[in-house]
Image (spheres, rainbow, N blue to C red):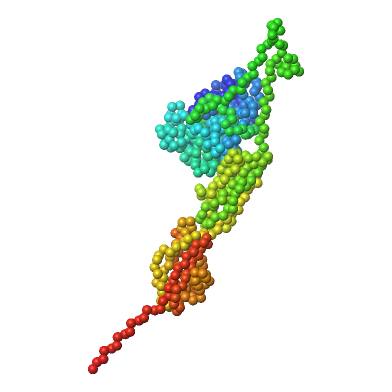
Amino acid sequence: MAAQFGRRLRRGATTTAVAAAAVAALSASQAPGVAPATSGGSQEASDATPPPGTPVTGNSPYYTDLPPLNSPDAPGTSGDPVVTGPGEAGIPATVLAAYKRAEKTLAETDPACRLPWQLLAAIGKVESGQARGGRVDANGTTLTPILGPVLNGVGFANISDTDDGAFDGDTVHDRAVGPMQFIPSTWATWGQDANGDGRKDPNNIYDAALAAGRYLCHGGRDLTVQDDLDKAILGYNHSREYLRTVMSWFEYYKRGTHEVPDGTGVLPVGDGPDSAGPLPSPTPRPQPKPAPTPNPSKPGTTPSPGPGTPGGGSGGTPTPTPTPSPTPAPVSRIEDAGTGRMTATAGQDFTARAKVRVENSRGEAVAREAVRFSVIGDTDTRFPDGGTSVVLLTAADGTVTAPALRAGEKTGTFTVRATVEGRDLAPRDFIATVTERVADTIVRTGSEAQTAETGAEFAHAIQVKATCRGVAAAGVEMTATMIRSADDPAENDKGPYFKDAQGNPLRTLTGLKADADGLLTLPKIYADVNQGTYRLRLTSPGGGSLDIELQVVAPAASSPSPSPTPTG
């Protein structure tokens, strides 16, 4: 079922014999599950049975370049030697960060799987050449979509469209998508949002790497067990050749690798997934032209300088030794980059947001570092997506700002912690505080006059609405007090009153709380024997205040009973 176009090797016209030597060398170095392939043949890598169902990639084509040999002059090779050197071990920075982050996430959520990031790197190599040499933006999204061939059954699996062309642009058949080559139907099940941008994007290396890791781990697999490892890889592509190729790169990366700038990774050759844009070919290094051999018998020629003279010893101008790129200083700390005082009232957004800067040991900014912001403590405050953590990448100046937090109902303090993913650095903590809800405005919902006769109760209930910035202040607390006058807020000792549980007069009520719509209906109010105009004041944290006039009048005069009519 594997959709391959023969055995594609590395740059240079390498032969099948060289490929066999490469696999043999890897086998000799204890690459588990790898058996040497003979010229023109194909051997089984293991006895593992491919898991049932459609593979992740739909058996799309993949790159079958093999890793470099430990020695380019291994006995028995012929033709051009396999290209060797540090370039093949280099993985683009953002791509490498995505693999390591996926490993860390799965170590926390599925520790029994024991997923190594080098396995993701091996699959990423054969599926897309590490996102086509690391052609990704700062957030890890490929600069152009990476698409496999149309899965129409002609040389490949026959898979009808499952995403209405949303990911692959094809409304008739599916195509494998992104740096880890997920077909849309598989992505619908395994897609992840690993970079916290609110999208599950198969073209994003962070999302795709975590999705691949979760797929490889599913079913209770332990990837340190060879049979589980083989089944996981075969579940990605039902091909023994694929298994051998992935295992070769897996062992190669386990022996050492390094980070290279995005866009500079070594690109595979041969058939593989197509890009929506043209794939730039690696720029060949110009070879120095040999100087012409001087002929002393001809006038005007000068013998080549001898050894010990500038340019001597070879008869031509020496090739200058390239200046090695400086080794980047290691990431060493995460600093506060101007985070303000983090306070908010319950139910409101925090106006200040956590902001940090990642620096190396020289104090220089480090871009494209993954920073995780986490909410820690007994709180129901959350990020906008409802989660307690989010991962974002630092900008060119090394800074990154967390999304605005939304305070929950629980008041008190908690911690917002910033950590650099995959780095053993001290975190940066920020203390955040949630205060009780407040109301900046309190208004009556009715307009009835509040009048009662002495010794009677007020006929109309008083209802008010509390708002904050024009929005209902749900659950806000208010206090109701019978005050002496507009200028004297002291509690009045006569006039209208509330009643406590025992029926005793009470002229101040505390702990009154508005409902979800900010509404509050006051308890019944009674009048004593004192006539006059009185004032009820409602207040709330945040400055909301409302005065309501209460009028106590004398009882209405009763009509005299008519005198009886005399008789006689």
Name the side, left or right, on which 189 lies relative to 112. left
x and y, in percent, of residue 95 in the image: 57, 35
x and y, in percent, of residue 21 in the image: 61, 24
Write down the quadrant of residue 19 in the picture.
top right
Residue 150 to residue 113: above or below: above
Residue at the limit of the structure toward the bottom, as seen here: 568
Is 507 or 469 nearer to us in this picture?
A: 469
Write down the quadrant of residue 308 in the picture.
top right
Residue at the limit of the structure toward the top, as seen here: 297
Is 200 or 247 nearer to us in this picture?
A: 200
Q: Is residue 223 visible?
A: no
Name the side, left or right, on which 106 lies relative to 530. right
Residue at the limit of the structure toward the front, as seen here: 487
Residue 482 to residue 93: above or below: below
Residue at the limit of the structure toward the right, as seen here: 308
For image coordinates 53% across by 24% down, the residue present is 270
Write down the quadrant of residue 105 in the picture.
top right
Is 127 or 318 nearer to us in this picture?
A: 318
Residue 445 to residue 235: above or below: below
For image coordinates 61% across by 46% down, the residue present is 337
x and y, in percent, of residue 93 in the image: 60, 35
Q: Is residue 484 visible?
A: yes
x and y, in percent, of residue 345 in the image: 53, 57
Name the side, left or right, on which 300 lies relative to 401. right
For image coordinates 46% across by 36% down, the residue present is 167
Residue 327 to residue 284: above or below: below
For image coordinates 46% across by 73% down, the residue present is 534
The quadrant of the image that shows the C terminus is bottom left
Q: How many marks?
A: 0
